[in-house]
Image (spheres, rainbow, N blue to C red):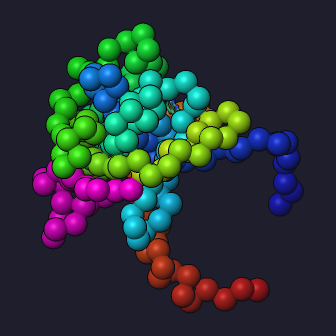
Amino acid sequence: MGKATLGRKVPTMGLPVAVVGAKVQGKVNFCTVAWVTMVEDDPPRMAVVMGKRRRTKDGIRENRTFSINLPGVEQVAATDYCGLRSGYETDKGEVFDVFFGKTLTAPMARECPVNIELTLDDIIELEGTDIVIGEVEEVYVDEGRMTSGQPDIDKLQLLMYLSPGGPYFVKGRTVAEAFQVGKGFRPR
Ligand SMILES: Cc1cc2nc3c(=O)[nH]c(=O)nc-3n(C[C@H](O)[C@H](O)[C@H](O)COP(=O)(O)O)c2cc1C
């Protein structure tokens, strides 16, 4: 099969979408991010890539804590809203029912089925974006979305985002077991 070339650009990719929470000058703020990843298992560290002007990042610098909330299908409009409006102009403190965990300053969105509470490790400044790296302090999961003590992906219905530009989607059918299906593979 022939290959089309698309030029020097990041192609279409399915990404998880998250809502980052932080307290800024005493006010709760949330910001939608699709550029989110884990960076280490032990210690457990995650990173989000944020634009230069993000009110939420001001709060992360201020308190050195933040949250990464994983929204489900029911939170799709609220998630989009937190990505359309900036805390510089709009008070987003009422978008979610907020709770706090052990850090006391990282606001988390109760409606999101998974909440990750982090302390700030480092901010790596790039030309157009900053990579915000945090250490995971605690993970909160809705009890009703667990099976045998583990988060259940079919019950969680976590939101994904097709970059760039959307749409939002959720996991489709399972294709194969990871770390398993490749065992019988033989290269040509
Ligand atoms: C689907 C979606 C994904 C987004 N992903 C990112 C991202 O990965 N990083 C980022 O800095 N902004 C991202 N944004 C834009 C921010 O959410 C937006 O600029 C927001 O208004 C920032 O809010 P704040 O200034 O209150 O922090 C995304 C927006 C949407 C709708």
Could you say which quadrant of the image residue 59 lies in?
top left
Q: Residue furthest top?
A: 89
User: Where's residue 1, x and y in %?
Assistant: 83, 60
For the question of whether residue 7 can be seen, the reply is yes
Q: Quadrant of the C terminus?
A: bottom right
The correct choice, above or below, for 113 with respect to 30 in the image is: below
Is residue 138 found inside the magenta-colored segment of the image? yes
Could you say which quadrant of the image residue 27 lies in?
top left
Number of numbered discs visible in the structure rendering: 0
The correct choice, above or below, for 45 with respect to 105 in the image is: below
Q: Residue furthest front?
A: 62
Q: Nearer the viewer, residue 66 or 9?
A: 66
Q: Which residues are magenta?
A: 135-156
Residue at point 57%, 31% (across, down): 51
Q: Nearer the viewer, residue 109 or 186?
A: 109
User: Where's residue 169, x and y in %?
Assistant: 44, 41
Residue at point 29%, 56% (across, down): 137
For the question of whether residue 79 can be seen, the reply is no
User: Where's residue 43, x and y in %?
Assistant: 40, 67
Residue at point 43%, 35% (across, down): 61
The correct choice, above or below, for 110 with respect to 173 in the image is: above
